[in-house]
Image (cartoon, helix red, strand yellow):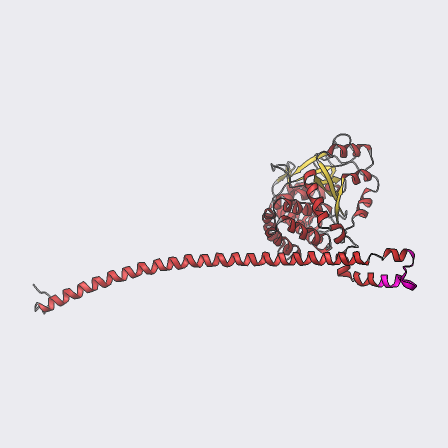
Amino acid sequence: RMGPKQQVADGSVGHGSWPCEAFAGTASVVVAAMIESAAGLVGFLDSLETLHEIFTDDRQQAKLFDLCGEFGGWRSCKGDGNCFYRACGFSVVEATLCRDPKRLLPIIQKLEHVVGRESKDLMSLLVELPHLDHELALEMWYQSFLNDAALDTQLVRALRLAAASWLENHRHMVFKNIPMETYVESEHKMDFQSFLESEVLTLGKEADILMIHAVTAALGFKIEIIQLDRSVGNAQRHGVPEEVPGEAVATLLFRPGHYDIFYRSELYKDVVQLEKSLQLRRLCSRGGADAALTGGGITGYESSWDQSLGAGGRSPGKAGHRHASRGDVLEDVVEALKHAMRSSMDKCVAAIDRETAEVRRTAESDRHACRDLEQEIKVLSDELAAKQEVIRELQESVSGLQASGCRGFWCS
C-alpha cells in the first residue's frame, strides 16, 4: 500500500486504496497498434493469450494466470485520455444488449436528459436498440461503432456531460471522507467550476476516481475495475460505485494510465461467437468491405486488378497475387450490402411496430372515451326524460285547475 496520495484511474493522483506502480515499457503503444477496426478507437475481441504476449513481467503473468478461470478475453481501447469513458460506455452498452436490450432504456433516458442537442447520431442509434432482438441490436452497435469514429467522440462527450451534471448536482456531498469541493481543490488545485470545465468536460483529459464514480452514479450502473500492474500479490479488484450492491454490468482492465475492456468467460464465448457469425473483422476492419463501400475501394481494386494483368492475362508477380481476390472483395461488398439492407429493414419494421402500437393505444383510448360519452349521454337522457315527466304532470294539473273554473291566484 502506498502513501495517502496515490496514482489512480488514468494516471491521475487521488486518495484511496488503489496502489499503482508506474508502468514501464511500450505496452500502450503495442495495444494501440493492435486496434484494427475502421474507426481505430475500439478494437476487436481478443483472447487472453494476446495479453500474455504483451505483459511479460512475471508478476503480471501470475495475475493473468489467476484470472484465466474467470475471464476469457479482452478488447483494446485507444489510449488518448478518453479511454475510461470509451471503455466504460462501449462495454456497458454491449453487456446490456447481450442480456436484454430493453434494459438499456433507463440509461438512454438519463443520457437524453443531460446531452440535450449534442451527440445526436449516438442517441439516434441508442434509441433504436432496445426495440430489437439482442443479436440484431449488437450487430447495429458493432457495425456502427467500429466503423464510425464520430460516434466514439459523441459517446465520450455524452459520458463526460453525465459526469459533470452529476458532480454539479452533488458538489456538497462528502467524498473520501471530505467535502467534494475540498477534495477537488486539494487534488486538482482549482475551484470546482474550473475543474468541471477543464478536467471533466474537456476531451482528452484523463479520468480519476471521482469522475469514474460520477459516471456510474449518474447513469445508474455498477462496473468492476481490475488492476493489472507489477505490484506483488493478486490483481486488485474494485467495484464502482463502492456503495452499490449487486453484480457489475461490465468489467474494465486497468493498468496505470490506461483502460481496456475485460470479458468474463461466459460473455466472452457469446461475443466471440457473434463476432465470427457477423464477420466483423472482415466488415469493420480498415481494409474491410464497409471501407471499400464508403471510400471507393471497389474502383481501386478493379484498377489495381486491371493494372496488374500482364500480356496474355497473366498477373505480374506479387502485385497480381495481392489483387487476385477480386471475387472475395465483391463477396465482401455483397455481404455488407445484405447486412445494411437487413438492418434498414429491421429498423423500418421496428418503426412501423412502434407506430402501430401508438395507433392501437390511441384507438383504445378513443374507445374508452366513446364509452364514457355514451354513458354520459344516457345519464343526461334519463335526466331529460324525468324532467319532461315532471313538466307533463304540471301541465295536467294546470289543465285540471282551468277546467274547474278557478280564475284567481287563490283558488279554494
Residue 374 lies, in percent from the top left, at 36, 59
The residue closer to the viewer here, 344 or 115, is: 344
Q: Residue pushed farthest front?
A: 312
Main SS class of the magenta portion in the image: helix
Residue 343 lies, in percent from the top left, at 66, 56
Decide whether residue 373 is among the magenta residues: no
Q: Quadrant of the N terminus?
A: top right
| Magenta highlight range | 303-317
> Can the viewer see residue 190?
no
The residue closer to the viewer here, 213 or 320, is: 320
In the displayed structure, 231 sits above or below 377; it is: above
Q: Quadrant of residue 38?
A: bottom right
Q: Name the side, left or right, on which 36 lies relative to 352.
A: right
Tell me what residue is drawn at x 90 percent, y 55 percent.
318
Q: Quadrant of residue 404?
A: bottom left
The residue closer to the viewer here, 275 or 52, is: 275
Residue 201 lies, in percent from the top left, at 69, 51
> Can the viewer see residue 326?
yes
In the displayed structure, 206 sits above or below 371; it is: above
